């Protein structure tokens, strides 16, 4: 696949720092804060943001993973991947203030499924949605509360966020032509 | 690129038909469904709007209820028809019953029948998915799934495990399905029991056959007990139940021959004091109740995969005709 655009590690981490600061600004007094990454793409990013927010707020913010696979509306034609993350929620969902994180927002269907999955687990007080990249092409009335980058893409392009907590210098966000 | 689990079968008829990858696909979905068991809200929306028909022409408790729960957890509507309450008891043929069920817009038929091959026969005459819940002495494929899922849950992997199946093998569809499943997943299988119920001919399936129970149990990682299938036997295969228990029943002394971490499985119904000592059935080694729970998630996986494959096949046919 041909590379159309690459966002470097430095740009990506600057964006993550800004997102974390914005989250702390809003949530520094929240007592029931929990950070949840959407499997699979949002897991590494959520861990990174959880580390940064915990450090800025000076206390450990619980973080977890949510897998909304059985709420997806395209599961029949788009089967579950072999290396999927399982749902791991560190706390009971009732009355929590959730920061929900994904790497990329596209049609909005994944977020719709994830919100349904969250409400199957309990009733949170609120959900804020954070994405690193908004690539457009929304099919549902869903918008992130916090966005790192907004880039117009075409439907025949693929976006991949590479985030490695062990080796952040190689992190990048790349747009490919199929 | 990440590989995905794939499934293309509309019907689930036997373990013999399946590849190891297909078994792993079912387990991957069952793993996902297992996560939902402890929730307050246990229902998932995946088969909302589908109607599933349980056509049980033989008695069943666990399998029938587990299929019903599985279908309901996936938000499907379920109707159960049993032998004495169906038009089959009024002389209607199985073919006509199945055709009528399909004409009533059911989306899946789950069938249990005393005739081997009945599920396969139904799958050829209706377009909707047919799930085999036991056909005569042929196969009980979802039972083998939950047994292997339970072994996988305990040991992580079946590769290299020594599994002994003890009891009435000759008349057991559970044994046949498990022989296929265990070997496909890499386990070594030993069959044990009286020579009249465990013929040497079974060695053709690639398994070991022992008529001495102590030899069979030694160093086993797991033992699957099978009850005596009185309903399928037309002649006497051993002198008495008392003698069977004495010669082949699993008691504490015999269980001590198993590996220390070994587990005991039983598909139920358990005849306490016959094939297994009552205390042993309730011991820490027993995973009988876990098997019942795993029966729900494995059947959720099968229902989901077959119903979804059928819907996709229909969509592909519609697109091809457009």
Image (tube, coloured by chain):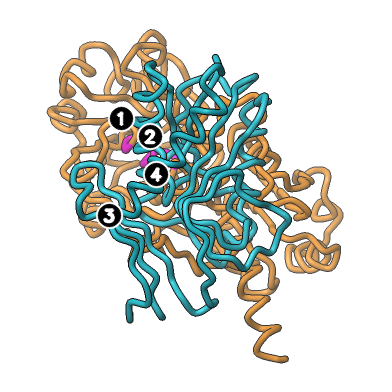
Q: CA distance from mark 2 to mark 4?
A: 43 Å
Q: Residue at x 31, y 18 (%)?
A: B285
Q: Is residue A20 magenta?
A: no
Q: Residue at x 52, y 73 (%)?
A: A153
Circle 3 sits on which residue? A9
- Say whether residue B172 is visible: no
Disc ID at residue B150: 2
- Name the chain letter of the residue that bears numbered label 3: A
- Labels 3 and 2 touching (C-beta < 8 A): no
Question: Which secondary structure type mostly characterizes the magenta part of the structure?
Answer: helix
Q: Position of residue B81 (x, y in %)?
A: 78, 46
Disc ID at residue A16: 4
> In the figure, B289 relative to B114: above or below?
above
Q: CA distance from mark 1 to mark 3?
A: 42 Å
Q: Residue at x 67, y 33 (%)?
A: A119
Q: Secondary structure at mark 1?
A: helix
Q: CA distance from mark 3 to mark 2?
A: 44 Å
- Labels 4 and 1 touching (C-beta < 8 A): no
- In the picture, which chain is cyan? A
In depth, the one of B171 and A158 nearer the eye is: A158
Q: CA distance from mark 4 to mark 3?
A: 10 Å
Span colored in magenta? B146-152
- Name the chain letter of the residue that bears numbered label 4: A
B289 relative position to B246: left or right: right
Q: CA distance from mark 4 to mark 1?
A: 41 Å
């Amino acid at each position: 696949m041909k590379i159309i655009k690459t966002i470097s590690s430095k740009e990506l981490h600057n964006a993550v720092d800004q997102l974390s600061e914005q989250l702390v600004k809003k949530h520094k007094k929240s007592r029931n804060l929990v950070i949840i990454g959407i499997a699979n793409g949002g897991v590494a990013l959520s861990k990174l943001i959880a580390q940064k927010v915990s450090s800025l707020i000076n206390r450990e913010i619980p973080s977890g993973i949510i897998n909304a696979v059985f709420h997806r509306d395209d599961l029949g034609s788009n089967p579950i991947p072999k290396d999927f993350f399982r749902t791991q929620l560190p706390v009971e969902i009732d009355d929590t203030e959730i920061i929900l994180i994904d790497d990329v927002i596209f049609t909005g269907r994944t977020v719709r499924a994830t919100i349904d999955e969250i409400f199957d687990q309990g009733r949170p007080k609120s959900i804020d949605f954070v994405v690193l990249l908004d690539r457009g092409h929304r099919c549902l009335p869903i918008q992130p509360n916090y966005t790192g980058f907004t880039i117009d893409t075409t439907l025949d392009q693929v976006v991949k966020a590479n985030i490695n907590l062990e080796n952040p210098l190689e992190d990048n966000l790349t747009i490919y032509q199929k | 690129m990440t590989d995905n689990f794939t499934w293309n079968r509309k019907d689930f008829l036997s373990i013999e038909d399946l590849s190891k990858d297909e078994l792993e696909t079912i387990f991957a979905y069952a793993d996902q469904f297992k996560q939902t068991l402890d929730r307050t809200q246990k229902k998932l929306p995946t088969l909302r709007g589908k109607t599933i028909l349980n056509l049980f022409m033989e008695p069943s408790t666990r399998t029938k209820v587990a299929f019903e729960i599985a279908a309901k957890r996936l938000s499907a509507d379920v109707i159960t028809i049993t032998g004495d309450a169906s038009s089959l008891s009024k002389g209607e043929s199985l073919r006509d019953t199945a055709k009528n069920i399909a004409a009533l817009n059911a989306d899946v038929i789950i069938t249990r029948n005393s005739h081997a091959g009945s599920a396969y026969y139904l799958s050829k005459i209706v377009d909707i998915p047919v799930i085999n819940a036991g056909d005569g002495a042929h196969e009980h494929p979802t039972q083998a799934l939950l047994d292997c899922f339970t072994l996988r849950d305990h040991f992580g992997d079946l590769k290299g495990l020594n599994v002994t199946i003890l009891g009435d093998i000759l008349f057991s569809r559970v044994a046949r399905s498990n022989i296929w499943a265990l070997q496909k997943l890499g386990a070594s299988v030993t069959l044990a029991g009286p020579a009249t119920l465990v013929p040497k001919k079974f060695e053709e399936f690639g398994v070991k056959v022992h008529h001495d129970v102590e030899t069979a149990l030694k160093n086993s990682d797991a033992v699957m007990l099978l009850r005596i299938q009185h309903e399928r036997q037309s002649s006497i295969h051993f002198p008495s139940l008392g003698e069977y228990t004495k010669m082949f029943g699993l008691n504490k002394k015999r269980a001590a021959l198993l590996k220390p971490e070994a587990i005991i499985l039983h598909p139920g119904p358990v005849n306490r004091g016959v094939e297994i000592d009552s205390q042993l059935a309730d011991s820490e080694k027993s995973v009988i109740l876990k098997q019942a729970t795993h029966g729900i998630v494995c059947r959720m996986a099968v229902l989901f995969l077959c119903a979804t494959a059928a819907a996709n096949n229909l969509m592909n046919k519609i697109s091809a005709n457009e």
